[in-house]
Amino acid sequence: MEAGWILRGIRDYLVGEKGVYQFDPARSVDLPAVHRVDIYLHIPFCRNLCPYCPYNRIHYDKTLAAAYLAAVLAEIDLYYERLGHVEIGSVYIGGGTPTTMLDQLVPILMHLRKRFPLNGEIAIETIPSDLDEKSLAKMKDLGISLLSIGVQSFDDRYLKLIGRNYPARILTPIISQAMTAGFDTVNLDLMFALPGQTTVEALDDLKRAMSLKSDQVTLYPLFTFPYSAVGKHRAYQHVILPSLRIRRQMYRALYDHALAEGYQRVSVWGFKRGEMPGFSSVTRRTYIGLGAGAGSCLPGVFYFNTFSVSAYIQSCVDGKLPVALKMSMTPSMEHYYWLYWRLYETTVPKQELHQVFAEQARILWLFRLASELGMMTDEGDHYILTERGSFWIHLMQNHYILNYIDKVWSTAMQVPWPGRITL
């Protein structure tokens, strides 16, 4: 309770006490006029449900996947009827495990291109056990240019601990195949600060990933959510949120090694080499979410689709957008949304910052203070987060976001059409 009041107090200091932070039932869906948006497509199916995963997912079912395909095609049509021939800037396909529906992605992307001009990149998440020469070629044929592989670890002990269903021995040949398949960027996801893991072991995973010439490596500490299997079953006493000291020590070691190897930061957790495009799922500013549990961020409003796969399918079949929750976004909230992702990217353009927060001197003062405390450096036209700032500022952000996610997800995963959720 005390932590909640502290977080609320900081939020009120920054954005004002009169802000309303709540999701309401979306009894009507009024889409603002847009000329260009990005697309997020959520595939909720997995063949193996990892206990730590907080995302909306269910066991793969062939019959349900066929119905889900029909629903996504219908949802695309519903947006086309409301928005017209709006341009699609990029497509991000996440999950779940999107490659459980790799064959169904063919008609989905064909239909998306039929309805809207698609002029940008297509990115997809996958797991090592779903990859082989045939699946990689199919993704290339679909026009997918950015590939992220959820490796998590090269150590069998930790793969087993976090519930991954593949042995470490398959990783090197599969990653090598992906690296030569012609994608613009291949990102490898790794987890660190796993229960019992040492800094040396975490560094060994990073070194293995970089030895395979991966274009990008994204490193996440283990997070647990009360509604995930790990959070619900504390019988997993060996799977707990690592201590702050361990996360701090490991992050510094991983950060220093990545830069020493010639990689550059693209986010708090991500490092890439060369000039290829960076892989990112979260920094798109205006997007429409397709699929069960997908979110849509549009001017003045944020929507969540129903998390229930069956309710999602039925809504689309009935010719109704499957939106369950909506939050009105004030200009101030949109400004902070912009700032959150610029901090996540570790680079904040000063001119835009001063334009966005021209009437909020306290924000500009906080940036000067952060510079004096060594959290960021003033590079003239940009503020750049230091290693110290990347860790501590994002840790503070996570106190808000993880609490918000927990509150929304906990309700939405249990109730297909929730009532009001106040944050």
Image (cartoon, helix red, strand yellow):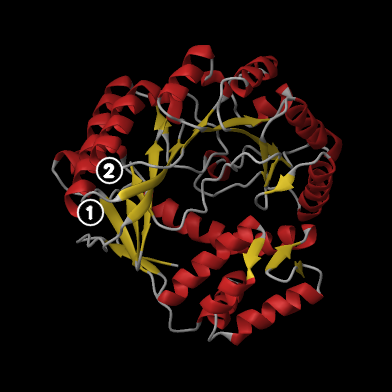
On screen, residue 227 versus residue 208, left or right, reads left
| Proximity of marks 2 and 1: CB atoms separated by less than 8 Å | no
- Which part of the image, by quadrant, shows the N terminus? bottom right
Give the numbered dot on residue 83.
1
Residue at position x 26%, y 33% in the image? 111
Corner quadrant of residue 383: bottom right
Q: Residue 234's spot in the image, x, y percent?
A: 61, 42
Tell me the distance, in whole angstroms, between the alpha carbons under discs 2 and 1: 10 Å
Say if 45 sits above or below 34 in the image.
above
Q: Mark 2 falls on what kind of element?
A: loop
**Considering only order in the chain, which callout, 1 or 2, is on the residue closer to the N terminus?**
1
Q: Residue 15's spot in the image, x, y percent?
A: 51, 79
Residue at position x 13%, y 42% in the image? 318
Say if 339 sits above or below 411 in the image.
below
Give 147 or 277, whichever is nearer the viewer: 277
Which amino acid, mark 2?
Phe
Question: Callout 1: 10 Å neighbours few (<14), some, many (20+)?
Answer: some
Corner quadrant of residue 277: top right
Residue at position x 66%, y 26% in the image? 159
Give the numbered dot on residue 176.
none
Give 307 or 388, whichever is nearer the viewer: 388
Residue 46 in view here: no
- Which part of the image, by quadrant, shows the C terminus? bottom left
Direction left: furthest residue = 318
Residue at position x 79%, y 53% in the image? 248
Mark 2 or 1: in front is 2
On screen, residue 110 versus residue 344, left or right, reads left
Q: Residue 86's spot in the image, x, y percent?
A: 28, 51
Give the numbered dot on residue 116.
2
Q: How many marks?
A: 2
Which amino acid, mark 1?
Leu
